Image (cartoon, rainbow, N blue to C red):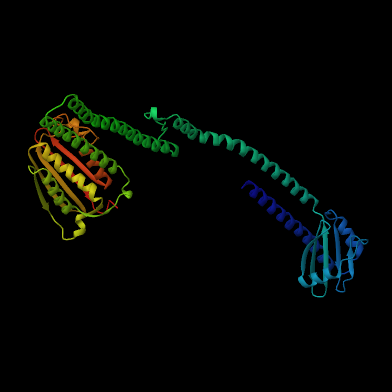
Amino acid sequence: MAMAFSIAIYYFSATYRKHEFYERLKEKALNYSQLLIKLDDINEGLLELVDKNTAYLPNERIIVLGDDNKELFNTYKDSHPIPAEIIAKVRKQKEIRYEENNNEVLGILYTNKTQVFVVIVSALDTEGLNKLENLKIILVVGFVAFLIATLIFGRLFAKQALSPISNVIKEVESITASNLTKRVNEGNGTDEIAQLAVTFNQMLNRIQKAFELQKSFVSNSSHELRTPLTSITGQIEVALMNSREPEEYQAVLHSLLDDIKNVNRLTNGLLELAQANLDISKLKMKEVRMDELLWLTRNDLLKRNPDYKINIEILDLPEDESQLQILGSEQLLRSALINLMDNACKFSSNHQVNIQFKSQGGAINISFRDQGIGISEEDLKNINQPFYRGTNAKSFAGHGLGLSLTSKIIDLHKGEMHISSKLNEFTEVNVRFDLGQTD
């Protein structure tokens, strides 16, 4: 930019100098022409006297030609004559400008009623060229100085501007798996660097949460698996210590079968939980009609637990079937519905759950309400974590995976789940799927 600016200044200055000098030459040519016309008896000596008493230009040469191209006046008689093609060009174009041996040359055609004069004026604009040369030096020196200053100050400003980024990089490099609680300094929280730090800290929060959940998951799953496996190992070792009656072996086998079923349920729960953590784009998705799936799930659960009472009430059933469908994984959605029904029946003394289903306002809403042991406010904060069980639920069979699995499945389908409860009175789970939000 600075170079282009300097070149532009030099170019326009050179153009102006040339134009101004040609105007001076033209003024001198017109003065001589008018003098010839006004003074009929003018002679060459008088013209020379006028020339000596006017401002002289370096290398100045003035030639005046008459109608027959005869020289009427020439300041340098020993100079070479003007070429005929130049004179012809002046007579044709009336004014020409060109350069010859570093001199600017102007030729004009001056006429009056009876005479036609060709006036050729040439000179060297020493003063103008010197000023132009000085301007060139000033511009070059100024450009170099500006370039050096730009490099110096640009480096300083760049270092100052990039220092926050360097600080962020150093802080990021210091964060490892052993100190995930450390955060990057967010500065003033308003500029782009601060926004980058805020975004990075938010990412660290998610990573820390996932890391802690993973540690908790591994620890809890190991504990849950170790308990039945230890029980199975102990029973087998005791059974092998002595010979026993067939009835005793059958009792041991029945006990082992219960423990193995427990391990199987836990393993299936862990596999479903792992599947619920997958990217939804990797799952087999299709349109699932939720009211039909609700009835099918109810029938499956009642086959396994005939003592359960599952009441379903359909409200505001729309005529458009698409208002009952969401895009999702039927297998995972079935698992979520079974968990909600099973939990409600299992923790209720009457083993009953009341379900309301409605499709309204572009969303599907399903509520599950029981009259069971309820969940305390403290437990509600952690109830969706894997293996977490309420303080009043530890006497019931289970591993604490149901609600965690259900929550992840609903999140995976871009749904919402809200739980409200009161100890020893009820628990109500509300699930909402916005239509068109799962694709």
The quarter holding residue 308 reads top left
Q: Residue furthest right?
A: 78
Q: Residue 388, relative to residue 407: is it above or below? A: above
Q: Which one is in front, 225 or 248?
A: 248
Residue 263 horizontal/vertical position (percent): 21, 35
Residue 81 horizontal/vertical position (percent): 89, 65
Residue 180 horizontal/vertical position (percent): 38, 30
Q: Residue furthest top?
A: 241
Q: Which one is in front, 1 or 322?
A: 322
Q: Residue 328, relative to residue 68: is it above or below? A: above
The residue sitting at 68% across, 41% down in the picture is: 144
Q: Residue furthest front?
A: 243
Q: Residue 218, relative to residue 105: is it above or below? A: above
Q: Which one is in front, 139 or 218?
A: 218
Q: Residue 349, relative to residue 325: is it above or below? A: above
The residue sitting at 34% across, 36% down in the picture is: 206
Horizontal side of residue 404 vs 173, given as left or right: left
Horizontal side of residue 151 vs 53, given as left or right: left
Q: Is residue 1 visible?
A: yes
